[in-house]
Image (cartoon, grey):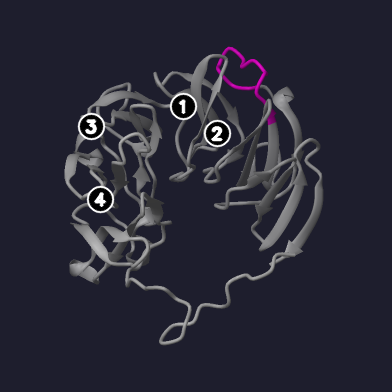
Amino acid sequence: PETDLPAAPVLGEGGNVAWTYEMAGRGTPVIADGRLYGLGYDGKAETLQEVLFCLDAATGEELWSHRFPDFLSDVIYTRYAIGSPTIDPATGNLFALTGAGLLHAFTPDGEMLWQRSLTEELGRLSFPNGRTGAPLIVGDLIITHFIYAAWGPGFGPARDRFYAFDKTSGEVVWGCTPGGPPKDSSFSMPIVEVRGGKTVFYAGLGGGHVCCVDALTGDVLWRYPFSIGGINSSMLIHGDKLIAIHGKENRDSSVIGRMVALDLTAEPDEEGNLPQSAVKWRNDLVAFTSSPILVQDTIFSTTLTGELNAIDVESGEVKWHEKL
């Protein structure tokens, strides 16, 4: 029903495109205080570099950029820069991850504050799909989500892990391993809330679990075995319900995909797993990477077959769907 919407984009004299900037990438740019920040790449083969860039959001003028060669990864050519910078609303500083595993902190003017090599220092693994995601900011912490393998009994085997860094110094504050052996490299972006007096986040894992972690300490509060394979979509919170979706095989059947609503008041068992009784409702929707959104009492989710679904958040019933 909206009117006066923009016309289709038209380049050139008399067109309605304000500016363009030549850069390849698969992440989403972000805008803060009139500046646009993005992560992309250019060049080919040995000349390929990932580029963290800052533009004037109104004019498209490049204000600064930093380039990073891929010195240590197995990312295939077209899958670089699958991630976004994260802006700290308290300071305006930005944080970004590269395909080779460098975690950077920069000022809005492009001055590097600190750098950590997650591969060299913590054993972060890379994969051909190039998934880096985006760092998560919680208070004074920068939280990352990768598969790591290192030395020793605690952090030796390859596991899906979270590490939190002090956003000012870059020092490691905590690390945690919520799930078991991973099947995939997950890039599920955690979502944060305060529940029971604790700041917690929920995320999907590469081994098929949904987890709840204390964001300030790294303590794993519970996990829910959801699928056989990695969960990439982000979760939704509606009251005491956590909405999750995956696109892999289910653990209790050979059917692919499921959306569930988990009862956030349920108590985990002795092993820290939520019981199946915590599932308030479920349906058979399939989403491998797309994350749902919530508008009032309706969930909107695009699924594997290219359909937009509207789901009742109280019952899980699909109210309508449309082929896109």
Expressed as whole percent of the image width and height from the top left, the position of residue 115 reads 19, 40
- CA distance for labels 2 and 1: 8 Å
Residue type indicated by callout 2? His
Could you tell me which residue is drawn at 37 percent across and 44 percent down? 86
What's the residue type where badge 3 is placed? Gly
In the image, which is nearer the foreground, mark 3 or mark 2?
Answer: 3
Q: Which region shows up in magenta?
A: 262-274
Horizontal and vertical percent position of residue 263: 69, 25
Q: Earlier in the sequence, mark 3 or mark 4?
A: 4
Q: Is residue 85 above or below residue 169?
A: below
Q: Give the mark toward the camera: 1 or 3.
A: 3
Q: Nearer the viewer, residue 135 or 181?
A: 135
> Residue 43: x, y in percent?
24, 71
Mark 4 closeness class: few <14, some 14–19, many ≥20 residues within 10 Å: many
Task: Please tell me whether the stretch drawn in magenta is mainly helix, strand or loop.
Answer: loop
Residue 27 vs 268, above or below: the answer is below
Label whose residue precedes the other's in the sequence (3 or 2): 3
Q: Percent x, y for residue 111?
A: 17, 46
Of badges 3 and 4, the one in the foreground is 3
User: Looking at the image, is mark 1 or mark 3 earlier in the sequence?
Assistant: 3
Q: What residue does disc 4 label?
A: 100
Looking at the rendered structure, which numbered label has been put on residue 170? 3
Report crowding for label 2: few under 14, some 14 to 19, many 20 or more residues within 10 A (C-alpha).
many
Q: Compute the Cα span from label 1 to label 4.
A: 24 Å
Q: In the rendered structure, find residue 178 and report the number of the disc placed on it.
A: 1
Numbered circle sitting on residue 209: 2
